Image (cartoon, rainbow, N blue to C red):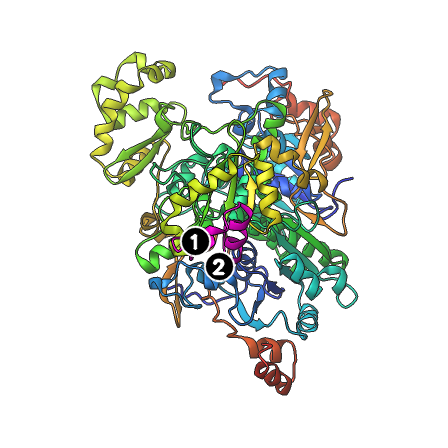
């Protein structure tokens, strides 16, 4: 059973790749009807992996594979969305879009700055049709300023957003993170903004326009670091796996190939418990480690002692022993281990859905538990291009089958089996 | 200094009781305050939010009002104090909860139980209240009593296994991203429930954990490990560099830059470097470039080392090619783009002094973001307990005298 938290709301998702689609995914998770709008000329880049018109045509089967499995988790990002394909560069396409706006609540887009205005589909136009509309635009650097036209990809923002500068081994260069971190984080900020706008609308009936510049959104998540520099004219550099203040903290080798446990001792009580637990009560009395500044000064020596203890245990054993003793510790889990660990399976974090082609795919449910509404769950896999044209154009907008066929013949609408346009 | 007068924020009129400390919960309520909500922070007497006692501090001075993370994470809130171990605490919290729409808490399991902070406990008095619990691992499950930390959350959610060099130990992402993500996620869950409460009149309990929030942001990369092949650590080598070698990160005369490519970007790159040795047809082929990476790098590196990272970045972007310089805080604070967009907001604090703070993560057209300095410990005790809650001044004085407040 789907969540009912946002049922009755309709969302038009014009966004591509990962960040803004994540915003829309959360709204879909919570029960909103989310329509993912693409065109055959401009399918979602994250979805299709189309780098140039020369890559077209995409055979149906190839597209199905892409939609279901490829890219940056396309299927995760677009599950429970409906697929609509309209060419917004045509007059009829624009007209259909405006008709959809009259029955929609939220519009999301992340085109380059100014694209929606050039299509004459900017907020000024749309809010005249539907004053209570909530629209969120997510350009990389915002609609103003010297970088407004810069190309912004998540991996570039990871560097420009200050994340890589702080990620790296003590003696090494900046490193990127395992995922393109800014994308989902900016998607989450988008969801906070849309939820605030929805709460406001529930109270006042008023719509809203929101601009989320990815760079600024990313920087808000390192605001404490920026403020350190502003106040003190210096700021924490790369510290590997250490903690900026507490000690010891690190990632230690365990039994097995590439098996590790993380440990973080954050106060005197934990230090005392830690020393006893690893069978080294003598460390507590050792003046080289009595307080946190001593432990920081002799961190390498401690790391060697800790590794001796962890290297004869499995990562799970080490974690469990330390946690039982009241010391923060966590095994370094592979993505597969992370998704299937008992804490998540017991809380129903994973779910499985059978695709139309008979393949069962796992999905992460929303990262919340609500006491009064059913747990979130995934109902449908990601849509194919234009998969739900008939429902949206026919049932919602009232176009006859003949009209729908005419639109498809003239290339205004398309679906996953359409021949691509000649460029 | 941002001198705009406030009109109202999208959450003006929403009242929030904030029983959180550290990073995750406070980031959630910082966003609420920025959007105009009235956020009443209850800090444990005598020392308040644990972050007040954790640096880095302004000028290295370990003072409760000079903790830099506290100053950033608590803008726009009002502060009251309460001895959570006092006999009066559960009832005072219940009374305060009855005055708000949303309660956000991150108490440890024992304190949560002792203070009876839950929707179930409050529902009789305030059925429409939303109670959002922010934890490391969740209110239920085998890890419910485990202790979390940023590095532990990153390890268990699968981030560390895929961050770092393949031949070295897994690496923590710098900063406190798991905590911030948890704050964002808690915000969304809390406001979904608040929206639901406004439509139906029914409040509820929201349970949000750092483990689930951090795992969720891995999106398909996590799921692909179940259906295809497990991800391993790639170091920098997956950056979409023009060579895809050596990490895509190059040294300049003042730091690092990642050079990437949009479709057709190689030609634009060659024009930028402007060296005939690169203008050879064979190098138009990506595979050839990767095979001849050392040769290309020997041409490109001196060019890069003679220039600054931001100059290179701006020149590359001017040619519509994609790049990203490794920004340090000083680069961000002095960015002309951010200055023109007035991203930073100067705030003056009576103890810590004045500094530019990172501003709103997004902008609502025609509405202001509430950026006001973080509160002093207990600064708003009287206005919260007497004016807001309606406590008699005599009882307020009694509680103050007995150190309950």
Magenta segment, which residues? A265-291
Tell me, yes or no, whether the two marked residues, 2 and 1, touch with CB atoms within 8 Å.
Answer: yes
Q: Is label 2 on the same chain as label 1?
A: no
Location of residue A201 with respect to A214 vertically, above or below: below
Q: Is residue B326 magenta?
A: no
* Label 2 crowd (10 A; few <14 / some 14-19 / many >=20): many
Q: Quadrant of residue B197?
A: bottom right
Residue identifier under label 2: B73
The answer to whether any part of residue A98 appears in the image is no
Residue identifier under label 1: A223
Chain of the residue displaying label 1? A
**Residue positioned most to the front:** A282
Chain of the residue displaying label 2? B
Q: CA distance from mark 2 to mark 1?
A: 8 Å
The total of numbered circles placed on residues is: 2
Q: Quadrant of residue B155?
A: top right
| Front position in the image: B139 or B201 | B139
């Amino acid at each position: 059973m789907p969540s009912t938290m946002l049922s009755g709301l309709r969302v038009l998702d014009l966004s591509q790749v990962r960040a803004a689609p994540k915003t829309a995914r959360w709204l879909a998770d919570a029960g909103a009807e989310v329509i993912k709008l693409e065109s055959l000329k401009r399918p979602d880049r994250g979805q299709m992996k189309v780098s140039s018109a020369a890559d077209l045509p995409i055979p149906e089967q190839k597209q199905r594979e892409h939609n279901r499995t490829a890219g940056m988790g396309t299927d995760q990002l677009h599950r429970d969305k409906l697929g609509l394909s309209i060419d917004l560069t045509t007059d009829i396409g624009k007209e259909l879009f405006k008709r959809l706006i009259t029955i929609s609540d939220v519009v999301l887009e992340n085109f380059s700055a100014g694209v929606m205005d050039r299509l004459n589909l900017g907020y000024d136009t749309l809010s005249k049709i539907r004053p209570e509309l909530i629209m969120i635009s997510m350009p990389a650097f915002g609609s103003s300023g010297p970088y407004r036209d810069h190309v912004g990809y998540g991996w570039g923002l990871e560097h420009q957003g200050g994340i890589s500068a702080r990620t790296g081994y003590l003696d090494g260069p900046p490193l990127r993170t395992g995922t393109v971190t800014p994308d989902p984080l900016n998607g989450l900020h988008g969801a906070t903004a849309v939820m605030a706008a929805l709460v406001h609308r529930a109270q006042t009936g008023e719509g809203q326009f929101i601009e989320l510049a990815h760079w600024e959104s990313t920087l808000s998540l390192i605001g404490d670091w920026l403020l350190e520099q502003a106040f003190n004219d210096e700021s924490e550099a790369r510290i590997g796996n250490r903690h900026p203040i507490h000690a010891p903290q690190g990632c230690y080798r365990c039994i097995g190939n590439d098996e590790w446990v993380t440990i973080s001792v954050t106060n005197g009580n934990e230090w005392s418990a830690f020393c006893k637990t690893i069978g080294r009560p003598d460390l507590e009395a050792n003046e080289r480690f009595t307080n946190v500044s001593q432990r920081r000064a002799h961190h390498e020596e401690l790391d060697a002692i800790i590794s001796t203890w962890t290297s004869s245990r499995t990562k799970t054993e080490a974690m469990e022993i330390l946690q039982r003793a009241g010391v923060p510790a966590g095994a370094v889990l592979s993505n597969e281990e992370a998704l299937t660990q008992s804490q998540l399976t017991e809380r129903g974090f994973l779910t499985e859905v059978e695709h139309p082609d008979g393949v069962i795919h796992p999905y992460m449910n929303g990262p919340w538990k609500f006491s009064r509404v059913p747990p979130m769950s995934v109902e449908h896999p990601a849509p194919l291009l234009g998969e739900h044209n008939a429902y949206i154009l026919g049932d919602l907008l009232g176009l006859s089958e003949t009209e729908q066929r005419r639109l498809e013949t003239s290339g205004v609408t398309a679906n996953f089996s359409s021949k691509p346009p000649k460029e | 200094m941002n001198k705009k007068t406030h009109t109202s924020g999208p959450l003006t009129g929403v009242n929030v009781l904030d029983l959180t400390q550290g990073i995750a919960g406070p980031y959630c309520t910082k966003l609420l305050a920025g959007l105009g909500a009235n956020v009443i922070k209850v800090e444990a007497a005598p020392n308040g939010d644990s972050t007040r006692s954790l640096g880095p501090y302004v000028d290295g001075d370990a003072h409760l009002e000079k903790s830099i993370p506290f100053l950033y994470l608590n803008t726009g809130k009002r502060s009251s104090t309460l001895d959570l171990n006092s006999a009066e605490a559960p009832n005072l919290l219940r009374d305060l909860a009855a005055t708000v729409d949303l309660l956000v808490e991150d108490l440890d399991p024992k304190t949560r139980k002792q203070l009876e902070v839950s929707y179930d406990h409050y529902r009789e008095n305030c059925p429409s209240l939303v109670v959002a619990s922010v934890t490391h691992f969740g209110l239920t499950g085998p890890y419910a009593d485990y202790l979390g930390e940023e590095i532990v959350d990153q390890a268990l959610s699968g981030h560390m296994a895929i961050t770092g060099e393949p031949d070295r130990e897994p690496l923590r992402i710098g900063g406190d991203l798991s905590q911030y993500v948890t704050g964002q996620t808690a915000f969304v869950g809390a406001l979904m429930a608040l929206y639901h409460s406004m439509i139906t009149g029914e409040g509820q309990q929201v349970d949000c954990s750092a483990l689930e929030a951090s795992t969720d942001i891995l999106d398909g990369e996590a799921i692909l490990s179940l259906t295809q092949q497990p991800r391993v650590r790639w170091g920098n080598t997956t950056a979409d560099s023009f060579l895809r070698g050596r990490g895509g990160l190059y040294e300049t005369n003042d730091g690092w830059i990642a050079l990437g490519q949009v479709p057709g970007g190689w030609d634009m790159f060659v024009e930028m470097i402007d060296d005939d040795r690169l203008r050879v047809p064979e190098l138009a082929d990506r595979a050839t470039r990767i095979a001849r990476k050392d040769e290309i790098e020997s041409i490109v590196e001196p060019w890069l080392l003679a220039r600054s990272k931001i100059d290179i970045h701006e020149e590359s972007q001017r040619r519509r090619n994609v790049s990203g310089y490794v920004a340090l805080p000083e680069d961000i604070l002095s960015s002309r783009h951010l200055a023109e967009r007035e991203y930073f907001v100067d705030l003056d604090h009576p103890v810590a002094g004045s500094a530019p703070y990172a501003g709103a993560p997004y902008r609502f057209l025609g509405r202001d973001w509430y950026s006001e300095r973080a509160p002093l410990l207990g600064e708003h005790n009287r206005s919260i307990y007497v004016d807001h809650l309606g406590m008699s001044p005599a009882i307020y004085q009694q509680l103050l005298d007995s150190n309950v407040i």
